[in-house]
Every structure is written in C-alpha cells, then in structure tokens.
Amino acid sequence: MDRMVLNEANLTNAVLVRTVLTRSDLGGAIIDGADFSDAVLDLTQKQALCKYANGTNPITGVSTRKSLGCGNSRRNAYGSPSSPLLSAPPEKLLDRDGFCDSATGLCEAK
C-alpha cells in the first residue's frame, strides 16, 4: 500500500499489521478500531492519525492508538517490519491455515 491515496477511506476495524504505508495519503480516513501494529508510516502521517485515533480492533484486540504508537516518546515504540523484536505479534490472528485454537484464538505458523 506504499504511496496510495486513501483520502476518506473507511478503514474501520481493518487489520493493517506490517503494512507499508510510506508516502501514502490517509487524510480524513476513518480508522476507528484499525490495527496498525508494526506498520511502516511516515512520522507526519502517524502524528496526524494519532490526533483522532480511537477504538480497539475486534479481531486482534489491539488499541488503534497503541498500534500507532500514539503518546510514546520513542519513534518506533512498537517495532517495525525491519525490527520486529521490539514488539510482539497480535494475540489473535486470522485463521488462515486452520491451525487456530478456538478457545484462545491463537494460531500456529506451519
């Protein structure tokens, strides 16, 4: 999604984990409940989104503000795709391969 124009896009509850959104325009986008964990965003875009970010993603359980790193003094407080050890993956993952535990919502990578 690098260099995309997503003005006023409805990204409600979107799972944007590890997406590359550099030079993308998210002006006026609806991001309630969106999960941006480990996404790569320009600092100015991240700051703009933090002004109105709210909600918690129903799939991953991650707060939109937390996933963007809003209010943190560290620029990449939650990691990035190039340094994923700074953060943990979301607790709940999509059941892509059928290896998910229905009780916990956790999946094994196989």
Image (tube, rainbow, N blue to C red):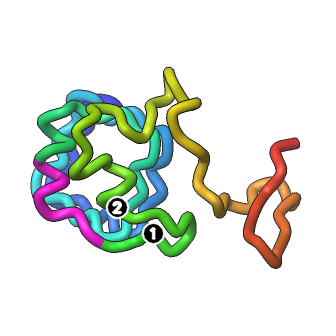
Residue 50 appearing in the image: yes
Q: Earlier in the sequence, mark 2 or mark 1?
A: 1
State the image quarter where residue 75 is shown.
top left
Residue 1 appearing in the image: no
State the image quarter where residue 30 is shown.
bottom left
Q: Is residue 93 left or right of residue 34?
A: right
Q: Is residue 76 left or right of residue 96?
A: left
* Between 56 and 3, the one nearer to me in the picture: 56
User: What is the number of the mark on residue 95?
Assistant: none
| Residue name at image x 18 percent, y 54 percent | 50
**Which amino acid does the dot numbered 1 rest on?**
Asn
**Which residue, given by chain and number where applicable, does mark 2 sit on?**
64
Residue 27 position, x and y percent, is 11, 51
Residue 101 position, x and y percent, is 85, 68
Residue 6 position, x and y percent, is 22, 49
- Residue located farthest toward the bottom when viewing the structure as drawn: 103
| Gap between marks 2 and 1 measured at Cα | 7 Å
Task: Give the secondary structure at mark 1.
Answer: loop
Instruction: Say if the magenta span includes residue 51.
Output: yes
Q: How many marks?
A: 2
Q: Is residue 14 above or below residue 41?
A: below
| Residue name at image x 39 percent, y 50 percent | 36
Q: Quadrant of the N terminus?
A: top left
Task: Give the secondary structure at mark 2.
Answer: helix
**Which residue, given by chain and number where applicable, does mark 1 sit on?**
57
Q: Is residue 39 above or below residue 31?
A: above
Q: Quadrant of the C terminus?
A: top right
State yes or no: discs 2 and 1 in contact (Cβ < 8 Å).
yes
Q: What is the span of residues highlighted in magenta in the rendered image?
A: 48-54
State the image quarter where residue 74 is shown.
top left
